[in-house]
Amino acid sequence: MIEKIIELKKERKAVILAHNYQLGEVQDVADFVGDSLGLSQQAAKTDAKVIVFCGVHFMAETAAMLSPDKIVLLPDPNAGCPMADMINAEQLREEKKKNPGSPVVCYVNSTAEVKAECDVCCTSSNSIKVVERLGDERPIIFIPDQYLGAYTASKTNKKLILWPGYCPTHMKIGVDDIINLKKEHPYAEVLVHPECRPEVIAQADHALSTDGIIKRVRQSLSREFIIGTELGIIHRLKIESPEKIFIPASKRAICPDMKAITLEKVLWALERMEYHVTVPPEIREKAVKAVNRMLEIV
Ligand code: SF4
């Protein structure tokens, strides 16, 4: 199957992207493994004609926005992100009416039509910088993740209006999981994603994006790490730092949407050239502005 994928990839002039939460076997067949925005940016720089995005729908949309001349395929059309789907453009327009003049910051984990309604995007690694650069006059509407929003607010003196979205996978990591593991592994460094609940973050040494966790492990002198994010990341951590030990904060932190992509589906995507993800030009134009504004800031 891997040979067939590689053969078809060449034939189609395709590039395969895999998010850090993908199954290990899918990560292994990818040209690039990383976080959603970084992957879309890397793919945009290539001369590939086709992008196979092994991730969830909003990620494929971001790739389509940044590479409008490439065909973007999502191997499973039902791989969505429940958190991104917790707000739609209509709900955001209502929220803006309730808070006239407030700037809107959206986490990249949002749909293209929602991004198109926002002033600026952010990622889990730059949300603090983005929020700090906005004016002080009005509170900032932050969507869709209340926990990344709360973490960002705690690190700035800005007032944020938080949309009550959340990641169901990171919600599965409980504060007791971390407390118990810290007792069992007193020398382990605790790294969690800022999509975790505040009480979980309070128990951690660092709250970092997925690529931030990978970098921290590379640089740290610690030998053991308690990892508070989706389990797929441990595959990459083990490859990059085989001498280190990784303990998942919760074995239940598995995103079913991320795990919907399998090697078979990657092969079928290339064989059948399915499933196309596109963003209408009028949405794309506005949504790309929000992404570019973030890139200017950071
Ligand atoms: S891990 Fe959470 S934020 Fe990421 S795709 Fe799954 S549900 Fe969405």
Image (cartoon, rainbow, N blue to C red):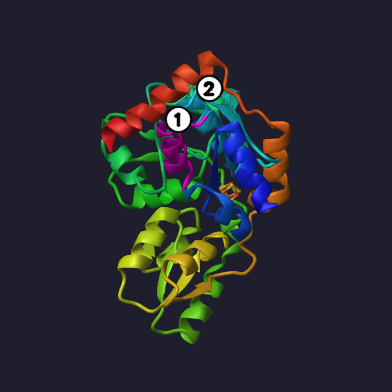
Q: Quadrant of the C terminus?
A: top left
Secondary structure at badge 2 equals: helix
- Residue 81 can be seen, yes or no: no
**Residue 119, x across and y down, in percent:** 39, 26
Q: Is residue 259 above or below residue 247?
A: above
The structure residue drawn at horizontal position 68% and vertical position 42%, both measured from the top left corner, is 79
Q: Quadrant of residue 290?
A: top left
- The magenta stretch is 35-48
The structure residue drawn at horizontal position 27% and vertical position 34%, both measured from the top left corner, is 297
| Residue 274: in magenta span | no
Q: Nearer the viewer, residue 132 or 223?
A: 223
225 vs 233, left or right, is left
**Residue 140, x across and y down, in percent:** 38, 34
**Residue 21, x across and y down, in percent:** 56, 55
Q: Which mark is residue 75?
A: none
Q: Which mark is residue 93?
A: 2
Q: Nearer the viewer, residue 169 or 248?
A: 248
Q: Nearer the viewer, residue 195 or 59?
A: 59
| Residue 43: in magenta span | yes
Give the overall secondary structure of the magenta segment: helix
Secondary structure at badge 1 equals: loop
**Residue 188, x across and y down, in percent:** 41, 79
Q: Disc 1 marks which residue?
A: 47
The structure residue drawn at horizontal position 61% and vertical position 34%, both measured from the top left corner, is 11
